[in-house]
Image: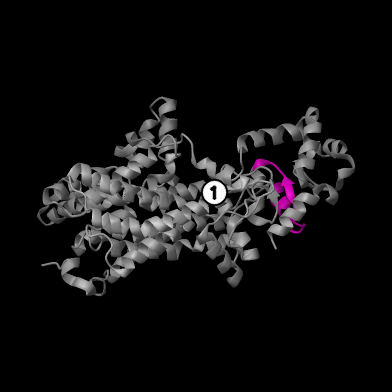
Amino acid sequence: MEPTAKSLGGRGAAHDRPPLAYWLLPALVALLRTLPYQASLALEPPPGTFSLQMGYMPKDTLSYLSFVRQAAETGRFLFYDQFTTEPQAPRFIVLLHWLLGLLSAGTGWSPSLVLELSRVPLTFAFFAVLWSFLRPILPDRRTRLTACVLVGLSGGITWLVDPLLRLAPAGVAWQFSLDTQGVFGWSTFEALFNPLWIAGLTLSLIVLGPILAPEGPRRLRDYAALTVGFPLLFLVHAYSALVVGAVAVALPLFELVLARRFAWRRHARIWLALAPVALGLLWLSRWQAEDSVYRAVSGNMLGPEHLSVFWYPVTFGAILLFAMRGAQTWARELHPYRLAMLAWIATVVWLHSSPVLNGYHFILYLHLPLCIVAASAVESAWSLRRSFGVREWAVAGLLAAVLFVSPIVVTARAIGDVALYNVFPAAYGEVLVDLQRRPAGNALVPPTLGNLVPAYTSHRVWVGHWFMTPDKVRRAAQYEQWTTDPAHANELRELVDREAIAYLVVPAARGDAVSRELGAAVVERAPHGEVELLVLRPTLAARGASDLAAAIR
């Protein structure tokens, strides 16, 4: 008879370690998730272009690199937003990127290399914590191992439906492609591309353990998970902390409504541990929001961009069916974690479908609990294989494909995306090299280049990042207008003066005209192919330069 976590007592962890073969699972996941980065190293960009050495989503990864580089250069724990030129105090806290910055400084490795390599140890840490987290929920080792494999390697059938939707109206196909992107994290494998998300998921499991447990927190390490783990989670990834807090709020409501009971002592212990740190984090958030730049950027969390439950049959596929079957079994057997899992799942459904919170941020927390509930049903189905005939084995093979083909397709698509999104004009690379040797200052550059500058230099840009630049869409349009249309020369001069712009990049064809418009403010012109870098008079950029000098001391 398989021993339970309860029967193992205090020595359960020592006597219930994962089998050695278990570590092949994180090794395989880490290998697949690293392949796009390897593809970026081998990429031969077309003539007249250069490519970035990073695996995923340059538009977001570049903002992470900005933080890692700041920490590597200064050791600073509080970060500036370098994607805007407004005067600001350092108020951004991203604990993981601070630690990676210190590692970069200590090893001499580039921030991009440190960020990419961090995915491997973080993946192993996640699966180590996952095994421990599942021990009381799934005491049977075989079922627990099944759950871990599902978490790591299962996915939906987007790859199967996508070609069929090409026959549908263009609007339907476009919406499907937009809403089911792998970078949202519809499966845990998809979410594990992002080191920040891996760290958030790992810490979330540590904090959720005593919250979901039927007996609540009892041991010292349970209270440590709440009082220390929760603030660490917030400092690493605030969205993860919001999910955990929402689950802690929802759980007693579900118990009261569905079970007609309320274990008030259990929840009192949870909230006596969480409340003081939650109040401290609220104070921290209020202090951060006193800075206008931080307040403007953090406001981007609010918005109507959500993901619909309509896509579940495709994005979760067979996992959804097995989870429904597993939920029936849990309800019939009165599984002690049945309400906890329901509260977790329902909370994430509510968050990711929210038209107020830009709910797409939360979808990555849904696949994991579905896999936990589905594990027993999958294990039962697989145990029938001993009596299978040829037809049954064919059905089993088809089911395995439906469950586990997704990581292969996702990896192939991510490798293909490297050639699509990592390539930029060679002129932008030349400007970056030029700016790296110049004193820190404020820069007005094309929006695409503006997304690159803070990742590789100490300069700030007026426009560059979809999230970190306040009102980015309007600013991008204004840059285009002010640097190409002579009718807006006065507005360009006003911006250069107001924002203390030290470096201005304009189309090469407009270099002479813009230089005349700015007159004596231009002290140097550096042509770089299709664009030209104008270096402006130091006195004009004094405010921005002194502000940035204070920032990097």
- Kindly indicate the quadrant of the structure image that contains residue 109: bottom right
- Kindly indicate the quadrant of the structure image that contains residue 445: top right
Look at the picture and state if 264 lies above or below 132: above
424 or 249, nearer to the observer: 249
Q: The disc labelled 1 sits on which kind of residue?
A: Asp
Look at the picture and state if 490 lies above or below 114: above
360 or 161, nearer to the observer: 360
122 or 441, nearer to the observer: 441
Give left or right: position of 294 versus 16: right
Give left or right: position of 309 versus 553: left
Task: Please report the bounds of the magenta region as a residue range.
Answer: 427-447
Q: Which residue is mark 1?
A: 60
- Which residue does the image show at 18% across and 62% down from the upper left? 140
Q: Where residue 283 sits in the image (x, y, percent)?
A: 50, 53
Residue 149 appears in the rendering:
no
Q: Where residue 491 sits in the image (x, y, percent)?
A: 77, 33
Q: Where residue 449 sits in the image (x, y, percent)?
A: 67, 46
Look at the picture and state if 492 lies above or below 139: above
Give left or right: position of 157 versus 489: left
Asked if the stretch drawn in magenta spans residue 442, the answer is yes
Q: Which image quadrant: the N terminus? A: bottom left
- Kindly indicate the quadrant of the structure image that contains residue 8: bottom left
Q: Which image quadrant: the C terminus? A: bottom right
Outermost residue to the right: 520
459 or 427, nearer to the observer: 459
- Which residue does the image show at 75% across and 33% down from the upper left? 482
- Which residue does the image show at 18% across and 67% down from the upper left? 6
